[in-house]
Each structure stands twice: as C-alpha cells, then as structure tokens.
Amino acid sequence: MIQQISNIRAEKQLTKEDFGRITYISCLNFFHTNTMFKPWPFGVFPVLICYWVKRVNANNYQFQRCYSNTAADTEPGVDRACDNPISRTLDQIKSTHPDLVCDKDGDERVLVRFMYRTTSNFSKDKIGFFLLNPKTFKMTYAGATNNLFAYELVITPKPGLFPGK
C-alpha cells in the first residue's frame, strides 16, 4: 500500500493522512468494526512506523520517521505524523536497522514496522488465544514495550514518495 496509495494523484509524496489510511486499511481483516479505536475492546490497537533513509554520503544520511496508530482521542481516532527529516550518521542508521544501510549516494530505503500494541485491558482470550500465550516485547527504536505480532520489511521506495509530509 505504501508503494501504490499515491498512484492516482499527480503529487506522489506521501502524507501523514496516507499513513493513517494505510494503518486503518491494514487491519480491517482483524477489526471489522470500530473495535480498533478507543476504548479498544480487544485490548490491542494497530501501529505503523516507517523509517525512511536517504544516503547523502558514506557517513551522512537523511532520516525520517512517519507513523500512524489508532490511539488518538479525536476523530477519526487515528494518530499520525511525519517528523521533520534529520541528519544521521552511518552508525545511527545501523543501530536503527542494518538493512537500512545504502550502497551508494542518493539511494533510499524504508523500514516498515507494523504491530499491535496491547492496552491495560488486554486479555489473550479476547483475541482468541485460549491455550497459547502471546508474548509482548520491545522493538528496537519503536518505543513501547507492549508490542504483539510485529512485522518488519525493508523496501526501496518508488521515487518521490519520501520524505513524507
């Protein structure tokens, strides 16, 4: 969806609203109603975090974090943002994820992380785990420690999608 959502627009650059739509659409197979929004009756909510990098030179990268989740208190219930791009060193990029390291100047990569975060009313029974006990964990550079079912993917984005706005 990240690669295709702006295909029908003249302006290809992704917006924070695009990230909100991607998060919402990505979890409709699990949440068929407004259960992905507060008060989260299943005790989980979806989170999408994208880390974009562009190599300027061997030790200098542009870096941006764009995220979206359904933890907002306001309508439509989707918290979303694209941070301002900042400069990062090669070591900082490696510590975020080693697959973000680019081979040549001008190359771009995006780390896509999608997960479900648990809330205070989380119970494994609410999501159908009666025998298995899913473990929560902290993902590097993703903040919270209460993550379930996290997936990571590193892609080379189509030209013009990033930095997000």
Image: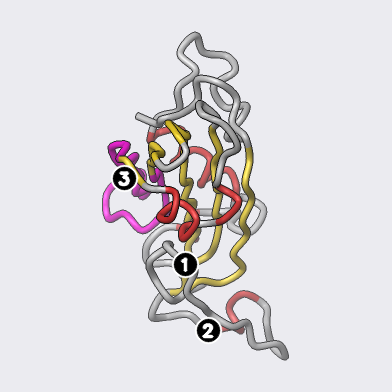
Name the residue that disc number 2 marks. 123
Residue at horizontal 43 percent and vertical 55 percent from the top:
91
Residue at horizontal 70 percent and vertical 87 percent from the top:
132
Going from N to C along the chain, the mark reached first, 2 or 1, is 2
* Residue type, mark 3 in image: Glu
Whole-number angstrom distance, CA of label 1 to CA of label 3: 30 Å
Q: Secondary structure at mark 3?
A: loop
Q: Quadrant of the N terminus?
A: top right
User: Are there few (<14), some (14-19), or many (20+) residues within 10 Å of tag 2?
Assistant: some
Q: Give the vertical position of 25 relative to 46 (above or below).
A: above
Horizontal and vertical percent for residue 72? 31, 54
Q: Residue furthest right?
A: 131
Residue at horizontal 53 percent and vertical 56 percent from the top:
97
Q: Indicate yes or no whether the magenta region holds residue 83.
A: yes
Q: Give the vertical position of 159 relative to 48 (above or below).
A: above
Name the residue that disc number 3 marks. 75
Whole-number angstrom distance, CA of label 3 to CA of label 2: 26 Å
Determine which of the numbered discs, if any, sits on residue 140 in the image. Answer: 1
Extent of the magenta region: 65-86
* Residue type, mark 1 in image: Thr
In front: 151, or 19?
Answer: 151
